[in-house]
Image (cartoon, helix red, strand yellow):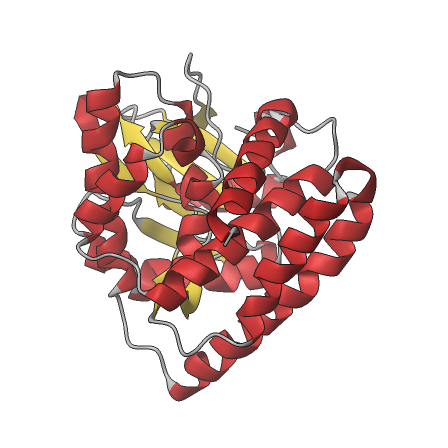
Amino acid sequence: MTDPTLLPEPVRVWAEKKLGTLTPAHTASPDLSSRGSWRVVRAGDNARFVIKIARSGEGYTRETFAYRHAVAALGAGNAPRLLATFPSHLALLLTDLPGLPLPDLHVKLTALQRIHWRSGALVARLHRAGKPTAADHQDASAALARLADDARPYLDAAEDRLSTVEQKLILLLTDRLRVLGRLPLGFVHGCLESGLVWGPQAHLSLRDFEESRFAPVVVDFARLACGPWVARPRLRNDFFSGYGRALSTDERLALRALTALHAVRTLAADECAPGHRQAVEDARVVLARLHEEVQP
């Protein structure tokens, strides 16, 4: 997690008033959740907690709403518990559920298949949490149009890394987001690729809800399609088997568009970012598969 020496003093004092004396936790396993998170241990009983500072006010609002109104639908122990908040510093105090995000697991394919089945079932619970309002439906349609608009600046930024054929393909697919019918809405996580965590005692959990909101549920699948499903496409079938239903025709079209958009974002990203080379290779594979799929 983030360097413990960078934890703001007011946040440390607040957390210790809630829990008692805390010390930074040291662990051999990497934690790839998000910036602005600190794992700590309570001196009295060695209980572990996470102190998280949201990167924006919107992220803080989304995450606190998720913990208070949606996370219970996942079932006890399947997500961290929110213990307290410190709004003036955008801070949250959470129980700790350690583990590795799905893309970082090194297990046999059969084990991965079971994990993705369970992931699909867990995500289905989240998507059914709460009822979207009429305003949520309206916002969702506008959000898809905004995503289509996002394609052009990313294409411009990655122009020298894309062929003319690839650029036309991305525009063709993303433009479909403007004309698709109403898609099934639900409470989405927003970043499942890093949010789904496999922990000790074969425990699956979901964390990091800064991007959660009501949206077409298909938006939750794009990062998986550009991540762990690239090298092992059969995991996609296992996930949707656990999810409990297949995607509709319009959802499949939307997923193609969203994966194309995610791929071009990756190609336009900072080349110094951790894991960039593998992400670029995956993006290339995704674009090649999409090109094959849309050929007459």
How many labels sit on residues?
0
Q: Quadrant of residue 231?
A: top left
Measured along the vertical axis of the image, is residue 159 above or below residue 43? Answer: below
> At which x and y percent is residue 240?
24, 48
Q: Nearer the viewer, residue 187 or 208?
A: 187
Residue located at (35% from left, 34% from top): 233
Q: Nearer the viewer, residue 104 or 238?
A: 238
Residue 175 vs residue 233: left or right?
right
Residue 193 vs residue 273: left or right?
left
Residue located at (80% from left, 47% from top): 157
Residue 106 vs residue 219: left or right?
left
Residue located at (19% from left, 40% from top): 118
Q: Residue furthest front?
A: 296
Q: Quadrant of residue 283?
A: top right
Whether residue 21 is visible, yes or no, is no
Residue located at (28% from left, 16% from top): 107
> At which x and y percent is residue 245?
20, 57
> At which x and y percent is residue 26?
44, 16
Q: Residue furthest top?
A: 28
Measured along the vertical axis of the image, is residue 261 above or below residue 141? Answer: above
> At which x and y percent is residue 27?
41, 16
Q: Nearer the viewer, residue 122 or 160?
A: 160
Whether residue 120 is visible, yes or no, is yes
